[in-house]
């Protein structure tokens, strides 16, 4: 059984980390069910284990937290749906790549509910959308913007951290970092794509598609 939890308001990052640490320990020990936790954070930056100092371009803009997950710098803030996914991969297959692919598939399936084609790239983490409405990249290729980030950590083969999908965040807040170390592409959101989607709408899409992907 997977427990779903949705938090109202903005959850402090330290509180979320503390909760995940405790819950993952309980799942690993068989004391608690798996969980997906849906929430929003106040504006902040997180640094993954591969974060480079030069990619934090405005150090004093928002609080910066060492996340302990893989990856580089990521922004979290209001209007972005974060899903912390705490699953026992001992029972679901000890395959990190397959797990990350399922997270990607889950995001892509949820976005498809709004007729958004999310795509993955072998050389870039996260989920991307092609932007024919925006100026082309400098090499003449179509512009692609990131709409969702993925960052995971495992302890005793129980996952935590997870995904972040941009619904209607302030996209200028991403200017204080080089998101995930990628300078050649931008970021977008469902609302930036011209879609009147709410956090609640996305939650329904995530919940509907989760069992199809993680069955």
Image: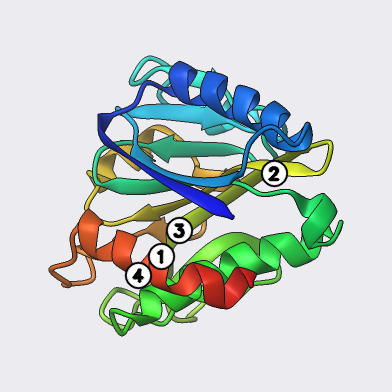
Residue 64 vs residue 203, the one in the foreground: 203
Q: CA distance from mark 1 to mark 4?
A: 4 Å
Q: Secondary structure at mark 2?
A: strand
Label 3 secondary element: strand
Q: Whole-percent x and y of residue 129?
A: 42, 74
Residue of label 2: 159
- Disc 2/disc 4 C-alpha distance (Å): 22 Å
The residue to which callout 1 is attached is 206
Task: Give the CA distance from mark 4 to mark 3.
Answer: 14 Å
Contact, CB < 8 Å: mark 1 with mark 4?
yes
Residue underneath mark 4: 205
Looking at marks 2 and 4 on the same chain, the residue that comes earlier in the sequence is marked by 2
Residue 82 vs 98, above or below: the answer is above
User: Which residue in the rendered view is the most extreme toward the left?
Assistant: 196
Q: Is residue 75 depicted above or below 125 in this figure?
A: above
Secondary structure of the residue carrying numbered label 1? helix
Residue found at x 39% / y 55%: 165
Residue 140 visible in this rendered orientation of the protein: yes
Q: CA distance from mark 3 to mark 1?
A: 13 Å
Single out the mark in the foreground, 4 or 3. 4
Residue hosting label 3:
148
Q: Position of residue 98 (x, y in %)?
A: 77, 67
For disc 2, the neighbor class at 10 Å (few under 14, some 14 to 19, many from 20) is many
Residue shown at 39% from the left, 37% from the top: 76
């Amino acid at each position: 059984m997977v427990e779903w939890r949705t938090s109202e308001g903005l959850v402090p990052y330290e509180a979320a980390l503390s909760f995940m640490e405790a819950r993952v320990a309980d799942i690993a020990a068989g004391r608690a069910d798996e969980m997906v936790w849906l929430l929003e954070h106040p504006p902040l930056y997180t640094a993954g284990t591969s974060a480079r100092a030069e990619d934090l371009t405005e150090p004093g803009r928002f609080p910066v937290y060492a996340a302990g997950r893989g990856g580089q710098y990521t922004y979290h803030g209001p209007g972005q749906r974060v899903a912390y996914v705490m699953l026992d991969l001992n029972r679901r297959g000890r395959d990190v790549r397959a797990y990350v692919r399922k997270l990607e598939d889950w995001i892509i399936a949820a976005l498809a509910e709004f007729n958004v084609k999310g795509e993955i790239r072998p050389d870039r983490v996260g989920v991307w959308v092609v932007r024919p409405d925006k100026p082309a990249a400098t090499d003449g290729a179509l512009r692609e913007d990131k709409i969702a980030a993925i960052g995971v950590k495992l302890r005793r083969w129980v996952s935590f951290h997870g995904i972040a999908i941009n619904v209607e965040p302030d996209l200028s807040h991403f200017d204080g970092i080089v998101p995930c170390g990628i300078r050649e592409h931008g970021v977008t959101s469902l609302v930036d794509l011209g879609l009147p989607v709410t956090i609640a709408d996305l939650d329904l899409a995530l919940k509907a598609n989760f069992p199809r992907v993680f069955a």
